[in-house]
């Protein structure tokens, strides 16, 4: 084959010379030499870390809880009775409802119902408001975390307080 005019001729070893059928391959020759000289290598032993990196067991004290924490739960009593805690819980929820304007709103509705329709319908509206709030809202929120359960108690405490304060029978 002749090269086209103006083209670069191929290098002299192109295509590479293929060794004869009985000649050893140069890669196999290198691997055979390596295998002959390399005997079983001993595994290197890990070097011990310097002294400043080794753990010192007596350097840090062992954390132990204070004695009052481990013995107090068996001897502790609550400072308030369960009824007192319940009264404070509900009273603060009712107070929060009054500050938020929920209790006066329910109270005005009960007072206007009592003025227009009488004592019976006002008591029915007030009691049904309390029962529906307790059944549909408060019953489903009692298991919540303490602060959220308290905030969810505000509507019921406000409805009960409004029923107690603003029914027409309480103003007689």
Image (cartoon, grey):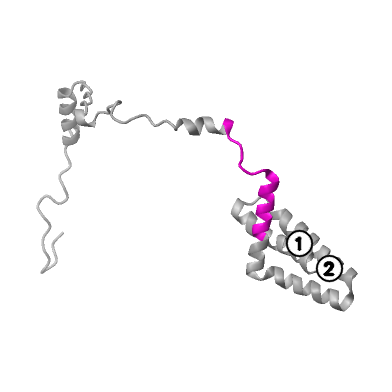
Q: Residues within 10 Å of mark 1 (few under 14, many from 20)?
A: many
Which residue in the structure is indicated by mark 2? 125
Percent position of residue 14, x then y: 14, 51
Whether residues under marks 1 and 2 lie with C-beta atoms below 8 angstroms apart, the answer is no
Numbered label attached to residue 160: 1
Residue toward you, 129 or 165: 165
Q: Residues within 10 Å of mark 2 (few under 14, many from 20)?
A: some
* SS state under label 1: helix
Residue toward you, 163 or 1: 163
Residue 62 falls left or right of residue 86: left
Residue toward you, 84 or 154: 84
- In the picture, residue 115 is in which quadrant? bottom right
* Residue at the far bottom in the pictured view: 116
Residue 116 falls left or right of residue 158: right
* SS state under label 2: helix
Percent position of residue 131, x then y: 80, 60
């Amino acid at each position: 084959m002749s090269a086209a005019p103006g083209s670069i001729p191929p290098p002299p070893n192109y295509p590479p010379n293929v060794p004869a059928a009985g000649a050893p391959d140069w890669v196999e020759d290198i691997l055979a030499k390596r295998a002959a000289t390399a005997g079983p290598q001993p595994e290197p032993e890990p070097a011990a870390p310097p002294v400043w990196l080794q753990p010192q067991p007596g350097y840090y004290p062992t954390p132990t809880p204070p004695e009052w924490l481990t013995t107090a739960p068996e001897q502790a009593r609550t400072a308030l009775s369960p009824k007192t805690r319940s009264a404070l819980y509900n009273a603060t929820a009712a107070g929060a409802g009054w500050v938020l304007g929920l209790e006066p709103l329910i109270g005005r509705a009960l007072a206007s119902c009592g003025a227009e329709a009488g004592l019976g319908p006002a008591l029915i509206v007030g009691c049904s408001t309390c029962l529906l709030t307790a059944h549909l809202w408060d019953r489903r929120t009692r298991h919540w975390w303490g602060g959220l359960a308290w905030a969810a108690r505000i509507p019921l405490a406000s409805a009960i307080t409004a029923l107690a304060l603003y029914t027409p029978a309480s103003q007689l």
